[in-house]
Amino acid sequence: MTLTPLAQRFVLHFGEMGSRWGINRTVGQIYAVLYVSQRPLNADEMAEALSFSRSNVSMGLKELESWRLVRLEHQPGDRREYYRAPDDVWAIFRTLAEERRKREVDPTLSMLRDALLETPQGPEDAHAQRRMREMHDLIELVTGWFSDVQRLDADTLKRLMRMGARVQKVLEFGDKVRALRPARATKE
Amino acid sequence: MTLTPLAQRFVLHFGEMGSRWGINRTVGQIYAVLYVSQRPLNADEMAEALSFSRSNVSMGLKELESWRLVRLEHQPGDRREYYRAPDDVWAIFRTLAEERRKREVDPTLSMLRDALLETPQGPEDAHAQRRMREMHDLIELVTGWFSDVQRLDADTLKRLMRMGARVQKVLEFGDKVRALRPARATKE
DNA sequence: TTAAACTTTCAGAACTTCTTGAACGTTTGG
DNA sequence: CCAAACGTTCAAGAAGTTCTGAAAGTTTAA
């Protein structure tokens, strides 16, 4: 299996970028090749296309599975395992965001929560705790919002995004309307 | 300079997490120590608090400067350089998001744009290009929206976030209102 | 049950990144 | 101008990670 020059470029770029955030070059390239492929690929095909050892591909695929970024499939009359990247780019984005939250954000949040329960020893600690609380609250707000918004269907999400900063207008407008109606309990 | 046990824990955690995404352990710890500190610190103080070599701290600070995450200050009658992390956590969040976009997203976007200008050689390429376009459009939508929203003031942003998924209701409501008024041009 | 066709695991080689002390450069006060 | 006090750079050793081939494990068809 050979890559066209176009796919080649995409794959190489993904390798580079992969190593710029936590994922390694190999894993990035494997994902890229799956992402642009028209049909699911088996491990040997990937190894050939990327000139990696078979075992390297195997490890890369395990990593991608742990991120839930690839799907395993079987073809009738062939017992090799075929992999593909999901079609829906929004779904990919969601998965990525969720996994990163789990790995990069949740542990911090729980460390912060623990630290905030302790009794501060002296004014240094009191200040440190204030700072930690600020960080904690920000992270909680942002991630909570993110997970709320992710539950919206793709169309609503797109509309919201295309609206961009104009959302402010809508909020203000909502305020005016609310001012004219009897007050209702709102969260904070 | 010595860290309290509380600060110690925070700093160690940040070191770990730092290496989980692109940044290295040292840099993470330096940032953490600045973040919780009540007053700006000079390089020697950080080196002592963290038991790093002076040169390691110097390099870490350069890295943090390149991310625009620390501020350099001077104290009267002292020619050492003092560093602090900005007070406003929202500002920190913004800076981080912007820098990550610059480093991790923009290069991909421009690679995709280039690739999309080429004439596809055969159906493989045509498919690869369709996939790249999907990715390109998604990234553009998300980052565009992000930069729009970042321009809102912190209060509006907080309200928007606290609203969470209920924003959908507001959008629907807006639709109804719009239906009752003469149409106006909207950006698709 | 066996052999063929796959996949996974693992120890160590190859490679990359990190960390340090030493050397070098710059600024300041005397 | 000098010496002290800083900050930066760099080469090289230490530490960490990635990648490979060989070996072991698993599944299937006959």
Image (cartoon, coloured by chain):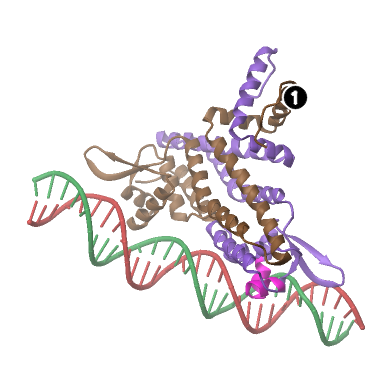
Chain colours: A purple, B brown, C green, D red
Q: Which residues are magenta?
A: A45-60
Q: Where does the C terminus of chain B fall, quadrant-wise? A: top right
Does the magenta-highlighted stretch encompass residue A56? yes
Q: Quadrant of residue A32?
A: bottom right
Q: Residue at x 75, y 24 (%)?
A: B179
Q: Nearer the viewer, residue A95 or B15?
A: A95
Q: Is residue B86 magenta?
A: no
Number of on-image labels: 1
Image check: A3 left or right of B87?
Answer: right
Instruction: Pinpoint residue B134: horizontal percent, then vertical percent.
Output: 68, 52
Give above or below for A128 relative to A26. above
Measuring 69% from the left and 40% from the top, which residue is drawn there? A158
Majority secondary structure in the magenta region: helix
Question: Which residue bears the numbered disc 1?
Answer: B179
Does any portion of residue A89 appear in the rendered image? yes
Q: Residues within 10 Å of mark 1 (few under 14, many from 20)?
A: few
Q: Position of residue C7 (x, y in %)?
A: 74, 71
Image: B37 above or below A16: above
| Chain for numbered disc 1 | B
Q: Position of residue A56 (x, y in %)?
A: 64, 71
Inspect this view and state whether residue A118 appears.
Answer: no
Q: Position of residue A165 (x, y in %)?
A: 58, 33
> Residue type at mark 1?
Ala
Task: Compare residues A113 and B20 and report the one nearer the observer.
Answer: B20
